[in-house]
Image: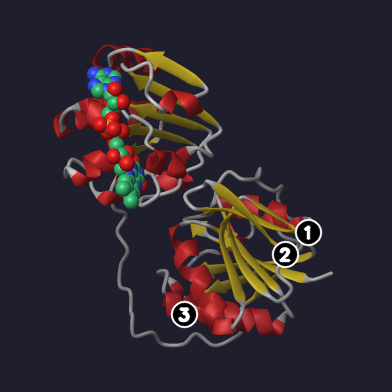
Amino acid sequence: MSSILVIGEAEGTEIKNISQQVSAVAAGMGDVVGLVIGKNISDAGMKLATAKIILADDEKLEYYDPVKFSSVISQVVEQNSITKILMGATTMGKDLGPRVAAELGWGYLGDCLEAGSEGFVRPTFAGKVLAKSNPEGSIVVSIRNNAYPAGESWSGSVENFSGNIPDSTTNTVSIEKGGNGTVELTEASIVVSGGRGLESPENYDEHIRPLASVLNAAAGASRAIVDAGWVPHSHQVGQTGKTVTPDLYLAIGISGAIQHLGGMSGSKCIVAINKDPDAPIFKVADYGIIGNLFDIVPVLKSKLSN
Ligand SMILES: Cc1cc2nc3c(=O)[nH]c(=O)nc-3n(C[C@H](O)[C@H](O)[C@H](O)COP(=O)(O)OP(=O)(O)OC[C@H]3O[C@@H](n4cnc5c(N)ncnc54)[C@H](O)[C@@H]3O)c2cc1C
């Protein structure tokens, strides 16, 4: 059995749901060790669903720093004879995974939809093709949000990281959340996205953001309105934006161009609102409402608010 390291991402006193999903996948693949890195993360770390947990809890690790985090991981890998590292394909995971792979001289597979002892499956060419890999050597893998259900709570041992934390020239002093409100687009279980059918940035603020807020959802966008400067690029869903796989994706005034579909077609349930019955978005939608969004969205918002 190989030893697998799961990187747990802490958020305050909680461990991110994506890390619990990754733990559940890893449990079927070998002996699993969890590693949580940060400052004052012990309460969150104890909740990671792995049999053994290593806590790297230090003032110097308060903010995500690629140099420090990848060094801590490399040391844990060496001390625990790890051959696979699994993490969530989050903003941090997408940055950290390739760096760790480069530091260790391992392979890297990003944004996987399936993971198991028999290999890994990930979308390529904007989701048109699913590539299956069965790497022979050691590997770092990131797993897309919502690909698996979260693991149960742990019942194992806890260790403190005893290695060395290097200095970093990056020297991150603070991290501010950008963009779309409180819910991160790639980790949201509901995404409400708007497109050019909204006609103006004011209408995006009037219709998309309040509906997202009522649903505790993240607000997303098509590239057309990002390019028009209505919302920042951090909102963009699609081939050249973010890939989202929420339980529910609402596409409002979005035509469903192939490049947009590449970023959201893995959503569990897709609801489209569009006045054109031939809009391509309806080909991937589970539920479609053909009509004027300016009539439909206010009704939806008011029903959901009650
Ligand atoms: C290399 C490349 C990469 C790209 N990457 C991305 C990407 O990452 N993400 C992305 O989104 N796009 C991407 N695009 C752009 C993509 O091809 C489309 O141009 C874009 O997605 C269209 O955005 P849209 O659906 O908002 O606009 P449109 O295609 O103009 O669609 C607007 C829709 O709103 C509907 N509508 C209008 N008024 C109303 C109303 N009152 N009520 C209801 N419906 C209404 C219309 O029927 C129409 O279907 C990329 C393109 C290229 C070439």
Q: Which residue is drawn at 37% across and 24% down?
A: 279
Q: Residue at x 44, y 80 (%)?
A: 67
Image spot of residue 201 (x, y percent): 16, 34
In the picture, measured across the screen, residue 207 lies left or right of residue 115, that is left
Disc 1: CA contacts within 10 A as few (<14), some (14-19) or many (>=20): few
Q: Which of marks 3 and 2 is nearer the N terminus?
A: 3
Q: What residue type is labelled 3?
A: Lys
Image spot of residue 220 (x, y percent): 34, 39
Q: Nearer the viewer, residue 161 or 92?
A: 92
Front disc: 1 or 3:
1
What separation in Å lies between label 2 and label 1 (alpha carbons)?
A: 7 Å
Disc 2: CA contacts within 10 A as few (<14), some (14-19) or many (>=20): few
| Residue 131 sits above or below residue 149 on the image | below
For ligand 1, the image quadrant comes to: top left
Q: Which mark is residue 134?
A: 2
| Residue 1 sits above or below residue 233 on the image | below
Q: Which of marks 1 and 3 is nearer the N terminus?
A: 3
Q: Which of marks 2 and 1 is nearer the N terminus?
A: 1
Q: Which of 20 and 132 is in front in this view?
A: 132
What kind of colouring is applied to the model shown?
secondary structure
Q: Name the residue under label 3.
A: 68
Disc 3: CA contacts within 10 A as few (<14), some (14-19) or many (>=20): many
Q: Name the residue under label 1.
A: 118
Q: Do the residues labelled 2 and 1 touch (CB within 8 Å)?
A: yes
